[in-house]
Image (tube, rainbow, N blue to C red):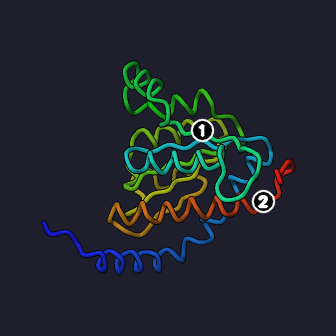
Amino acid sequence: MTAPSFQTSLTELQAVLEACRVLAPAVEAAGQAIIGSIRHGGKLLTCGNGGSAADALHLAEELVGRYRLERRALPALCLNADPTAITCICNDYGYESVFSRGVEALGRCGDVLVGFTTSGNSANVIAAFRVAAKLGVTTILLAGRDGGKARNLCAHEIIVPCHNTARIQEVHTLILHQWLEAIDATAWPDLLP
């Protein structure tokens, strides 16, 4: 297999970004759901596998830390961040339960769960969405391709119209950065100077 040139990858990404313009209302609505939850005392939970785990970590750490502006720390927790919890749950319940157990333990009505799965078929992310729905946790799917088995399970669904995992993840990063821009633009009650 020959690797595509950088120019080829850029051209492909440009086409995917153009196709994603239709996602703008869904991206903005999901971002407002996150802001509304935090504003009313809720928290953000995130999860994903592999590269999507990195995206889940990225989103959560930017809330607890900061993105660009100085502001108070915001409540967010990545469910794939604790290797001891992951190995305990996997050992006792199986990998499919690794995120749903975390949602069961930590999710409360009014919280938000963002699940990243490029295929939409990650069984553990789907299981987390199902538990979250039972608890009144707002669910946000970030997927690609056709949304897979996770399609139609969430309150907010953002499905990147592409089959290339790399391009899907690049758009997911753009989306999470857009949410962080919106969060930074929010007037939090105890905003630091």
Q: Residue at the far front: name it.
A: 193
Q: Helix or strand or loop: what does disc 2 sit on? A: loop
Question: Which residue position holds label 2?
Answer: 186
Left or right of residue 175, residue 48 in this image: left
Q: Residue at the far left: name it.
A: 1
- Closer to the chain start, of discs 1 and 2, is 1
* Viewer-closest of 110 and 172: 172
Left or right of residue 27, residue 168 in this image: left
Task: Provide residue 17's location: percent of width, then percent of height.
Answer: 46, 75
Task: Provide residue 45's location: percent of width, then percent of height.
Answer: 59, 41
Residue type (three-letter) at the residue carrying disc 1? Leu
Q: Helix or strand or loop: what does disc 1 sit on? A: strand
Residue type (three-letter) at the residue carrying disc 2? Thr
Task: Provide residue 192's location: percent of width, then percent of height.
Answer: 82, 50
- State the CA–CA distance, disc 1 to disc 2: 20 Å
When asked about the image quadrant of residue 166, the answer is: bottom left
Mark on residue 77?
A: 1
Residue 174 drawn above or below residue 16: above
| In contact (CB < 8 Å): disc 1 and disc 2 | no
In the rendered image, the quadrant that contains the C terminus is bottom right
Left or right of residue 186, residue 104 in this image: left
* Viewer-closest of 17 and 146: 17
Task: Provide residue 162's location: percent of width, then percent of height.
Answer: 37, 68
Mark 2 Cα within 10 Å, few/some/many (few <14, many 20+)?
few
